[in-house]
Image (cartoon, helix red, strand yellow):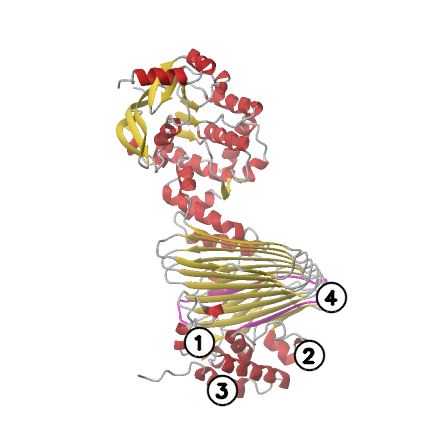
Amino acid sequence: MTDVADPREPYLADFARVEREFHGDDPAWLRETRRKALATFRELGFPTQKHEMWKYTNVAPITRTKFTPAVTIPGNGLPAEKLEPVVFGKFEGSELVFVNGRFSRALSSVRGVADGVRLGSLAEALRERPSEVQPYLAKTARYDANAFTALNTAFLQDGAFIHVPLGRIVEEPVHLLFVSTSRQEPAVAYPRNLFVLEEGAQLTVTESYAGLDAGVYFTNTVTEAAVKGGAVLDHYKLQRESERAFHVATLEIEQGRGTNVSDGSFCLGGGLVRNDVNQRFTAEGGEIAMNGLYSVTGLQHVDNHTRIDHLTPHCTSRELYKGILDGRARGVFYGNIIVHPGAQKTNATQTNKNLLLSKEALVDSIPGLQIYANDVKCKHGTTTGQIDEDSVFYLRSRGIDAETARAILTYAFAREVVDLVRVPAMRATLGVLLLSRLPNSEAVREAL
Amino acid sequence: MALLEVKGLRAKVGDKEILKGVDLTVNVGEVHAIMGPNGSGKSTLANVLAGRLNYEVIGGKVLYEGKDLLAMKPELRAREGLFLAFQYPVEIPGVGNAYFLKSALNSIRRHRGQDELDAMDFMNIVTDKMKLLGLDESFLGRSLNDGFSGGEKKRNEIFQMAVLEPRLAVLDETDSGLDIDALRIVANGVNTMRAKDRAIVVVTHYQRILNYITPDFVHVLVNGRIAKSGGRELALELEKRGYGWVEEEASRAPAVS
């Protein structure tokens, strides 16, 4: 029997090197946070399938691969035209571009941002105005239970930092683009985003993750959003990494009194993907729409874990996740809504629907609702099935060929989630991306 | 040459033989009513003509304009000019009513070697037909039959028929579940479609709709065969006397094919 190397070791060694070479000038509190996170990672280790939260996803392909921290590989220059395939079309707002986890000033543009709004690179903010970041960083995104969040926190260095002050409205959507390029050796990037919305603030932000080639790399990203009283956040994520890439993402949202959050997660790429979305209502009257669409094929594996904590009364959550699985793809939906004691008048719905396009595709759907209050309105449901043959016949009986009919019905299935996106540039891109995966996309476009 | 010639058609659903030798000839310009009690095979006949997959043809043949209809895929039948108005139209969320219909119309036009219509031409065509069926503008933007009332679904079927302009329209119990106002609207839509180069087959359980759509021929389907054929007066007699007497006659003297 050969010795199995401890998969934590390379990460611990990399941390020592990165800390020595890149973190020397960082404030003491930040270095302390990173060390604590690393200690947590060391303690937790990588999850195995014995862990309830990882039952359906084997992370061995990640732990078996040696990834070099992207930050230690020099150069993040990229000609702008390289980005063309992955940027949204026309839009008026700001765009921050990150190449292999690092902010690229040359590729980014900041436009039309109201006074007092901070919008830029987290690394710059930590360097120039650390006191503005300190109260929030790693406060919403807990790293005590998730090894990947702990790792991200240990290695965090750059990402987007957006702070919207009291009552300010960021009119145009802000687009964040994280691109990965192939390196000689597989690299890991740890984008870290922090959004703070003070009372009555309003922000729409999109995160896109894209691979510029078909390389093997690992994106371990964490986004945390602190949404204070009366603030409104629209947040969307589009994941189209290389189909050989690993993508592990955690989004943590904390909502104050009377807040309104809309989240949409669109997962199209990646080889092995895990998305965690965790949200908490910490005061009355909050509302969240938590939506997601995963469309995968081939050997892709995508695991969506969501958790909503109703800690306070009079909050509403509506969750809709849909999956389209083709080829030998594997999908997981795990939803958990917890209505805590005293969270009366909670209104919560959770729906997961899956469309299987091939006999070999597989999905595990585990909806969940735990209710510890007695005056609530909650429901959840899940369906998994194939394309409805009666619908196919109906379309065919009007002259539409069978293949196009199936493509139309597949797109129509996805469309419910796409239509919930309130950013036109993103909605248009999603439409194009989803259509491009279907046969007879011209005919489908005409029918929709 | 007849538009539609059904000869000794036999079909089963699952293990059950429903059609046991149907003979029917329909010429252009004619309106036929096919009536019959529950379970006599009316809907099966309509669905077999349209090419529904879970109906298995086990005997006989169907010629459409002299061609073997049963050998054609459902979409080809539609492109060749056959239209089925569904008894239970399917609700399809996410597919727009208007765009779907434009797509259907253009696939038929392509097949006929006609130019495809752009959005403007299409709107010109549908606006008039919508008025005919009492459908308002919001209807076009809605999802196909999604959340429609029973009456709206049936009107949508006739609206689609009006836009697609088939050679042979088969209406499968389009009258069922309609109140009298909706029935009049639907019947009016059908009557507008009557033409020298088109035939319409009205499948119905009740003769009520025939007060508004006057058929040239009435056939009574009993136990998978056409037991009796006649003119308009046969429908009236059925209304007065019910189906019992035809069933009795049929059991005494099985129709010969």
Q: Is residue B35 magenta?
A: no
- Locate residue A319, reporting x and y percent: 57, 56
SS at mark 2 in the image: helix
Q: Is residue A6 left or right of residue B182?
A: left
| The residue stretch that appears in magenta | A191-216
Label 4 or label 3, whichever comes before in sequence order: 3
Label 4 or label 2, whichever comes before in sequence order: 2
Label 1 or label 3, whichever comes before in sequence order: 3
C-beta proximity under 8 Å, tags 3 and 2? no
Instruction: Identify the residue under disc 3.
Output: A17
Label 2 or label 1, whichever comes before in sequence order: 2
Query: What chain letter is assigned to the residue under label 1?
Result: A
Numbered mark located on residue A131 in the image: 2
The answer as to whether the residues below labels 1 and 4 share one chain is yes
Is disc 2 surrounded by few (<14), some (14 to 19) or many (20+) residues within 10 Å?
few
Instruction: Identify the residue under disc 1.
Output: A187
Instruction: Identify the residue under disc 4.
Output: A166
Is disc 1 surrounded by few (<14), some (14 to 19) or many (20+) residues within 10 Å?
many
